[in-house]
Image (spheres, rainbow, N blue to C red):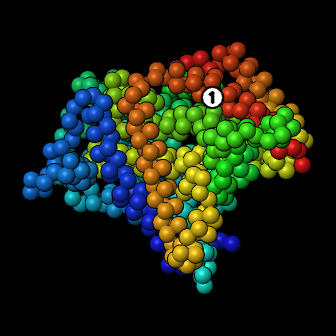
């Protein structure tokens, strides 16, 4: 039963090998490392860094992320339902329609509230 | 684990990573050159031989590997090194579940399927792997202690999680038509034809369809039964790959290079490589979902084998069919890659609010409508069980 996963394991191992090989090759074949202050500082188009990115910042798309969670969970239900759709018939169709209505209403509400305005 | 599993996996890695991806970087340059009326890459040579500039990918790799392995001050050294690897690995393993050939039965042998791993949840695997790639770009911007990088990774995370939802919802119609999540089964289901006006017979509107309508006998491909899903899925998956016209997270003219701006050498090279590998994976996925995978239009696998068997015997007929199927699949992948290149060099970059509006306000409602319209049509035409 787990036999079909062996191909996946081989590809995963090869992917790690390729990515690792390129990084290791870069480490050993890369040019000499010279460190001086101007080179080390983060690129800011020639300016000194005015604000540090390491402080707290407002995530403006917080609402988008919440919507993502709602709709991604819904999408998972849709996959299973879609793959069995022709067996479920009209019963499945109507059930899914009832399931989708609250989400559609939620989307319209967010839209009206301006959560999707950028 | 037998030898053939390893061989099938190696074929994928060799074709996708070692053959297609480097050549695409060359195609990208030549395509842009053609569209901008230039000559394009043609300088790299070995002893004066340039092979149309095909040595440029090799020169790129050598150059990137021999650059200094540089980490800027204040960066998180561990995450800075980890991010490109997190970006590259999902791109490489995405192709594992895409079938590049059918199931073949040679006389006296076990049947086998030409696919890396024949998972019955193949498409869910693709979506899961796709969402892992988000971490690469988000970590890269966050770890490099740069404001531009930070902005880029914020944009990348919002864009990628938004399009993940619609990417999943836009293909539900395809599951409903083929009744499977398994990409190998989906390709088998597409290896047949259907009549575009067949529903007229089903509803009894005509007794038999007139002969001049036989042009509407189409391959049972996703692009013909779910054209809207194809357009939406193509849009979403190109946005997931963050290439133009959806390259707001990189935005050279606004935020320099976005999330990978503090990356150089092979650290940058891995991001670059994963982008091009993803093009191949996307092309393979589009082929498997919407263009029948390995299937040859109007010539199903069984017909092909049965037709050749009297001439050359079952073994050779199966082998030739297998070669023809793999060649068909690769041809379709090449066409899909070309389509992506064409889109990338034709359209200008969208504004960020346009990208988000396209996702939440257009594709999401449309994909929900598509699901229910598809459902109603299937139940009306095929009849409820």
Report the front residue among B87 and A87: A87
Residue A109 image position (x, y, % from top left): 74, 19
Residue farthest to the left, as pictured: B47
Q: Report which quarter residue B204 is drawn in.
A: top right
Residue drawn at 52 percent across, 77 percent down: B312
Report the front residue among B286 and B69: B286
Residue drawn at 44 percent across, 38 percent down: B340
Residue B79 image position (x, y, % from top left): 42, 48
B142 left or right of B103 in image: left
The residue that label 1 is drawn on is: B363
Residue B105 image position (x, y, % from top left): 61, 75
Against A61, residue B323 (above or below) is: below
* Badge 1: residue crowd in 10 Å (few <14, some 14–19, many ≥20): many
Quarter of the N terminus of chain B within the rendering: bottom right
Residue farthest to the front, as pictured: B211
- Secondary structure category for the residue under label 1: helix
Against B121, residue B169 (above or below) is: above
Asked whether residue B143 is in view, the answer is no
Against B243, residue B218 (above or below) is: below
């Amino acid at each position: 039963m787990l036999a079909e996963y062996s191909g996946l394991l081989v590809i995963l191992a090869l992917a790690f090998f390729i990515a690792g090989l390129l990084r290791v090759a870069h480490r050993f074949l890369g040019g000499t490392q010279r460190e001086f202050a101007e080179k080390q500082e983060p690129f800011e188009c020639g300016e000194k860094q005015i604000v540090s990115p390491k402080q707290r910042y407002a995530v403006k798309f917080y609402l988008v992320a919440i919507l993502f969670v709602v709709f991604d969970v819904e999408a998972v239900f849709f996959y299973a339902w879609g793959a069995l759709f022709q067996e479920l018939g009209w019963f499945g169709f109507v059930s899914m329609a009832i399931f989708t209505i609250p989400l559609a209403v939620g989307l319209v509400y967010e839209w009206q509230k301006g959560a999707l305005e950028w | 684990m037998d030898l053939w599993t390893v061989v099938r996996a190696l074929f994928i890695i060799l074709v996708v990573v070692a053959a297609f991806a480097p050549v695409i970087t060359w195609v990208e340059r030549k395509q842009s050159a053609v569209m901008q009326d230039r000559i394009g890459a043609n300088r790299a040579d070995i002893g004066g031989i340039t092979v149309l500039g095909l040595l440029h990918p090799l020169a790129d790799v050598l150059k990137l590997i021999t650059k200094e392995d540089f980490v800027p001050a204040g960066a998180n050294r561990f995450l800075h090194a980890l991010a490109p690897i997190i970006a590259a690995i999902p791109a490489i393993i995405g192709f594992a579940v895409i079938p590049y050939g059918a199931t073949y039965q040679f006389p006296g042998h076990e049947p086998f399927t030409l696919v890396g791993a024949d998972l019955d949840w193949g498409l869910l695997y693709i979506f899961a792997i796709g969402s892992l790639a988000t971490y690469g770009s988000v970590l890269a911007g966050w770890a490099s202690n740069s404001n531009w990088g930070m902005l880029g990774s914020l944009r990348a995370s919002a864009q990628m999680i938004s399009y993940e939802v619609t990417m999943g919802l836009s293909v539900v119609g395809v599951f409903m038509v083929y009744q499977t999540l398994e990409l190998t089964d989906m390709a088998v289901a597409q290896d047949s034809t259907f009549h575009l006006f067949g529903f007229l017979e089903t509803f009894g509107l005509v007794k038999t369809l007139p002969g001049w309508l036989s042009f509407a006998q189409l391959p049972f491909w996703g692009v013909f039964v779910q054209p809207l899903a194809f357009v939406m899925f193509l849009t979403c998956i190109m946005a997931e790959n963050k290439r133009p016209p959806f390259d707001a997270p990189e935005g050279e003219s606004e935020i320099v290079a976005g999330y990978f701006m503090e990356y150089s050498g092979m650290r940058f090279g891995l991001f670059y490589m994963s982008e091009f590998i993803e093009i191949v994976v996307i092309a393979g996925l589009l082929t498997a979902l919407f263009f029948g995978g390995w299937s040859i239009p109007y010539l199903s696998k069984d017909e092909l084998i049965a037709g050749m068997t009297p001439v050359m015997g079952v073994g050779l007929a199966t082998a030739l069919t297998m070669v023809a199927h793999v060649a068909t699949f690769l041809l379709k992948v090449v066409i899909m890659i070309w389509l992506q290149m064409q889109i990338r060099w034709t359209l200008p970059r969208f504004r960020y609010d346009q990208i988000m509006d396209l996702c939440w306000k257009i594709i999401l409602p449309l994909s929900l409508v598509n699901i229910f319209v598809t459902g109603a049509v299937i139940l009306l035409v095929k009849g409820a069980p």
